[in-house]
Image: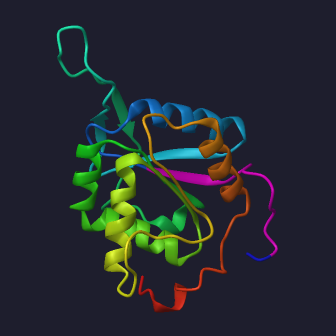
Amino acid sequence: MENARKGSVIGRRVAILVANHVDGAVISAMSKALQAGGASIKIIGPRLGEVISYEGHNYKGEHEGKPIKVDHSLAIISSVLFDAVFIPGGQLSAEILCNDANAVLFVKEAYKHGKAIGACDEGIILLTKAAHFAGTLEGEFQAPGVITCEGDTVDNAFIKRFVAAIAQHRFTDRTDLASIVA
């Protein structure tokens, strides 16, 4: 892996972790950027089928969302099959994923294996939970290749930083890897 092609996301596989009420706009923006660079994305959720994204409220104050097809369920897929992980925002989505042991393990293993991890807004909560279950860490995972963004919108700078992290392929210089059981 040390000799893997760096500087490009062509051929990289990126898992996007989702649950109901995930931020659909962020998924769309990130997916477009990754696919434009030659990466493939897979939507990973608690179960197969669809999740409903959170797109805001309509003029009547009712929740509006769009269905997002889930490619794989967390129970049957592993982070070892992917080169990177993206965790979009959405409060309810983050809460559901934090209560799913498979989601926590997915993120913890991706971190242990030096993969790029991107998280925005409430998705950062899952990073914190995975770091907690990694044992010796406090707070969220903060290391090379972990890209986070807080705010109302995911901007191009965040997307570019995450894409650049994926292009690096692995981050074996994370100082706490030996202390994590995955």
Front residue of 153 and 22: 153
Q: Measuring from the top left, give residue 52's x and y in whole percent.
A: 28, 32
Color style of the picture = rainbow
Q: Residue at image x 46%, y 91%?
A: 179
Q: Measuring from the top left, give residue 76's x and y in whole percent.
A: 35, 61
Q: Is residue 118 left or right of residue 78?
A: right
Q: Residue at image x 50%, y 69%?
A: 110
Q: Residue at image x 37%, y 81%?
A: 134
Q: Main secondary structure of the magenta part?
A: loop
Q: Quadrant of residue 175?
A: bottom right
- Which residue appears farthest toward the front when viewing the image? 151
Q: Where 174 falls versus 10 (above or below)?
A: below
Q: Is residue 142 visible?
A: yes
Q: Measuring from the top left, give residue 150's x and y in whole percent.
A: 45, 47
Q: Where 176 falls versus 154 (above or below)?
A: below
Q: Where 5 falls versus 63 (above or below)?
A: below
Q: Quadrant of residue 143?
A: bottom right
- Which residue appears farthest toward the top when viewing the image? 59
Q: Is residue 4 magenta?
A: yes
Q: Is residue 72 visible?
A: no
Q: Is residue 16 left or right of residue 146?
A: left
Front residue of 152 and 6: 152
Q: Residue at image x 66%, y 51%?
A: 161
Q: Is residue 179 left or right of residue 32?
A: left
Q: Measuring from the top left, give residue 147's x and y in whole percent.
A: 56, 57
Q: Quadrant of the C terminus?
A: bottom left
Q: Which residues are magenta?
A: 3-16
Q: Is residue 76 magenta?
A: no
Q: Quadrant of the N terminus?
A: bottom right
Q: Where 56 falls versus 30 (above or below)?
A: above
Q: Quadrant of residue 152?
A: top left
